[in-house]
Amino acid sequence: MVKMQTPWKHPDTGTFYYRQRVPVDVAPIVEGQRIDLSIGEERVTASVAKGMVKLSLRTKLVREAKDRHQTVAYALSEAWTRARKAGANGLVDLTHREVLALAGEYYRTVVAAHQDNPGPADGWDASLDPVIAAFDDPVLAERLHGADADLLLRKFGAMISTTSRHALIGEMNRAHLDAVETLKKRASGDYSTDETINRFPLASVAPRDGGEVILLTRLFDHWTSYHLKEGKSQRTVGDFKGKIDSLVSFLGHDEAQRVSQTDIRRWCDHLSLELNLSGKTVSEKYLAAVRSIYRTGLRSGIISVDPTVNVRVKVAKAPSIRSKGFTDEEAIQILKAALSAEHNKSGAAPETKAACKWVPWICAYTGARSGEITQLRKMDVIEQGGVTAIKITPEAGSTKTRKFRIVPLHPHLIEIGLLDWVNSRPDGPLFFVSTGRVRKDGTTQAADVRGKVGQWVREVAGIEDKSLQPNHAWRHRFKTIARTVGIPRDMSDAITGHEDGSASSGYGEYELSTLYKEICKLPRFSV
């Protein structure tokens, strides 16, 4: 994988800059030029001099600088591609016919995206205010249509002059107005022949990337190969596949290169407004999946544009009405019910009943993720230096940090019979009988058991508060109790497998005996 460059910090001002040497074959074409770039909704200009391109990232914040640096790198990569296609002629002046032809392509795209389900006609009237205002405001027009103009120009295969760009943006604004009028007709039930489209000449544009069609399925398969090679969760593969299928269904095609920022934004709006998904789900699940496969393809050189760059979904902050961890009463209620879980008369497998008993208890005293516990094997319960512990390792299944850790067990767990039960089990997984079958949707048996434990907490233990996560709430509670009894944060993180992102946290290890002393600070549950 290609190593991404990093922002350069000005030693005097502290402002971060993007600095890059221009590719040798492109340098003679762009030397001395000012290159217009669309960075999300912002329009910026990069100057080329002495074979270098330099651009202020307009921030002194490291994280923000890294995000903007990556965005600029992608945009410049496209600029170099257009420069190569333009050749020695450099910037191109479009003819009036070419400007209208490209505006027509934009018109067709807008109409095609909405005409099957245009919604109420008066809804389109509400969208016209910024379009009308843009006729007298070039900056607003650029913000409205700049990203889509760049997509059209990539098809055209040229770096156009500023004069031609202004003309194109103006005609795209006019085309957008025409598209709204057409969609209002569709919304009113008029699907007669579109006469407006006849005013636009057909565009004679060359397909980009040598005409090769790159499918989203190919990008997904490529991402999957890297994801699994790095030892990450098979479950994520199945989850991401569903998100990519959603995008393909919405677009009506599977061509990665045809997807624009506008397409991505409209898809996100569709998920939020029509499917009623939360902003958090759209941003952190659907958009994140598509962004991941595009960025992997970009780094590998399969594609040259990431349409998810600078697409953001507003996430409303959920109201906090209670602690995310179990209260003392709720914890006792679950653990008391767990002690008799193995003896209930349900038709669940003995291993599942055992999980309903032991997973809550282990999570309560370790703060571990419930999935880390349900995938434990008999060999993962160990003894070192007289301390009984569990080994949480990627060898057993998915771990969020992809790192192993050894967590000492509280003596109360031993006293209530955990070690005796483990010793009675055959070799292999503790909480299920392995079938060895790879599931198509990427889920695992351990994940199934985790879900069944959560269901048991709701239905049998009686924790019905929907604002609580029935398994993960133990992790929140552990952190709270750890602070109360004075377990240092770094040791609490070492026990629970949290990482703070600092470089120092990757150095050194904690002796098991040291962690055991901290675990013993936890008060016993009286059940």
Image (cartoon, helix red, strand yellow):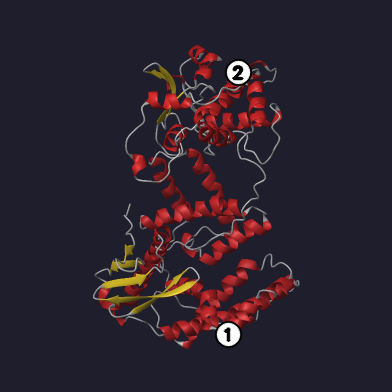
Q: Residues within 10 Å of mark 2 (few under 14, many from 20)?
A: some
The vertical placement of 200 against 355, above or below, is below
365 left or right of 21 in image:
right
For mark 1, give the secondary structure: loop
User: Camera-side residue: 318 or 231?
Assistant: 318
Q: Amino acid at mark 1?
A: Phe
244 left or right of 75 in image:
right
**Residue visible at 50% across and 70% down in the picture:** 41
> How far from the left and from the top, in percent, is residue 318?
63, 50
The vertical placement of 321 against 201, above or below, is above
Q: Amino acid at mark 2?
A: Pro
User: Camera-side residue: 132 or 185?
Assistant: 132
Q: CA distance from mark 1 to mark 2?
A: 71 Å
Quarter where residue 17 is shown: bottom left
- Which residue in the protein does label 2 denote? 350
> How far from the left and from the top, in percent, is residue 258?
49, 64
For mark 2, give the secondary structure: helix
Q: Residues within 10 Å of mark 1 (few under 14, many from 20)?
A: some
* Residue 51 appears in view: yes
381 left or right of 473 in image:
left
* Residue 407 appears in view: no
Quarter where residue 226 is shown: top left
**Residue visible at 51% across and 21% down in the picture:** 430
> How far from the left and from the top, in percent, is residue 184?
71, 74
Instruction: Check residue 135 in the rendering and tell me which mark sits there, or answer none.
Output: 1
> How far from the left and from the top, in percent, is residue 365?
53, 26
Q: Quadrant of the C terminus?
A: top right
401 left or right of 249 in image:
left
**Residue visible at 57% across and 59% down in the picture:** 313
